[in-house]
Amino acid sequence: MNFAQFLPINLLWIGLTLGKALAQPTSSEFKLVYQNTIQLPENTERTFVDYGNNLYFVAKDQVVRRSLALGFANVQSQKIWQNIDQILAINSMKTVVFSQAQQQLCFTDNTLSNQGPCIDLQEYDLNNVTVVAASKRPDMLWLYDELNSTLLLFNFVQRQIIQSVSNLRGILNLRGEPDLMENTSALWIFTNSGQVIRMDDYLNAISQQELVFSSIVPYRNGCFLIRDHHLYYETLLTGETLMEGISTLNSDNKLHISGNQLIIEKGKALEVFIIQEK
C-alpha cells in the first residue's frame, strides 16, 4: 500500500473539513440518558466492557462476567489467566483473554469456560504484542506488535496472519502507546500522546487528528472523550460538542462503549448512559 501517495490527499481533506467545522456552530446529534450505577465487586483490579453488553471484573486470576442486559453473573478462575491485560468478546459465544506478559490468547465460551488451548503468539514471531482488538470480520483479531511497530490482522481459527503493515511509527509518525478499537466505521488507533488515527479495511490511514483527552472511545463516525473535567463528542465533520447533563469528571475516569451504551468508570462504580439520537 502506498501511504506516501495517500496521506497528502487525506491531510488536505482533513484541513478542509476542520475548517468547515470551526467556521460553523455545532450541535450534538446525541443525548445521554442516565440508566443506572453499578458498583464494582470487592477487590476488583481491572474492569472491561465488550460490545455485547457484558462487564468483566478481574481480581488476580478470577474473572466475574456480568450481563448489562440480564444482570446475571458468571465467575471463573483459571491458573493460565495470569496478568490479564484485555478481555474481548468476539461474538455472543466466544471471548478472548489476552496476556501481554505471557504473549498468549486464551478463548472461552459465554460462561468463561476454556475453549481449546491458548495461542502462543511467539510461535508466529510476535514477541511484544501490547494490545489486541476484536475485528468486525468473523474469526479475526487485530494485533499491535511493538517490535517494528507492526499492525496485524490475525485469523485465530486458521491461526495465520492475514494482513500486516510494519513501521507504523515511521509511516504515521506514531507517538506514545497505541490502543486499538474497531467499530463499523473504521479501525481506530488512539495514543496516549493524543493521536487519533482511522484505518480502513486495507490498513490505509483515512484520517488523523491531534486531540487532548484523558480517556476516549469511538462511537459511529466520531469519539466520546474526557477533557478538562467534561465529556465531549468529536467528529471531523462537525467538530467538538459538549455533552450536557454529565457530572464533573476526573482525569482518572475511564470511558467504555457497549452497543448504544456509554459507561463511565468512576473509581469503584460504573455509571451507565443510553446514547439516544435527538
Image (spheres, grey):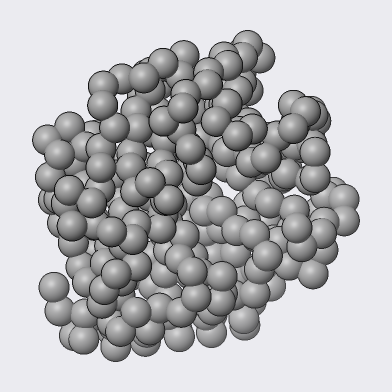
Q: In which quarter of the image is residue 57?
A: top right
Q: In which quarter of the image is residue 32?
A: top right
In percent of the image, x 58 and y 16: which residue is there? 75
In depth, the one of 69 and 157 nearer the eye is 157
The spot of residue 220 in percent (x, y) is 48, 50
In depth, the one of 79 and 265 nearer the eye is 79
In depth, the one of 234 and 268 nearer the eye is 268
Q: Which residue extends farthest right?
A: 248
Position above or below: 104 against 72? below
Q: Quadrant of the N terminus?
A: bottom left
Position above or below: 53 against 278? above
Position above or below: 164 against 140? below
Q: Quadrant of residue 165?
A: bottom left
Is 194 on the left-hand or right-hand side of 93? Answer: right
Count the numbered circles shown. 0
In percent of the image, x 15 and y 79: which residue is there? 2
The spot of residue 102 in percent (x, y) is 38, 46
Is 206 on the left-hand or right-hand side of 277? Answer: left
Question: Is residue 202 in sight in this rendering?
Answer: no
The spot of residue 161 in percent (x, y) is 15, 50
Q: Which residue extends farthest front?
A: 79
Question: Is residue 30 in sight in this rendering?
Answer: yes
In percent of the image, x 21 and y 47: which residue is there? 154
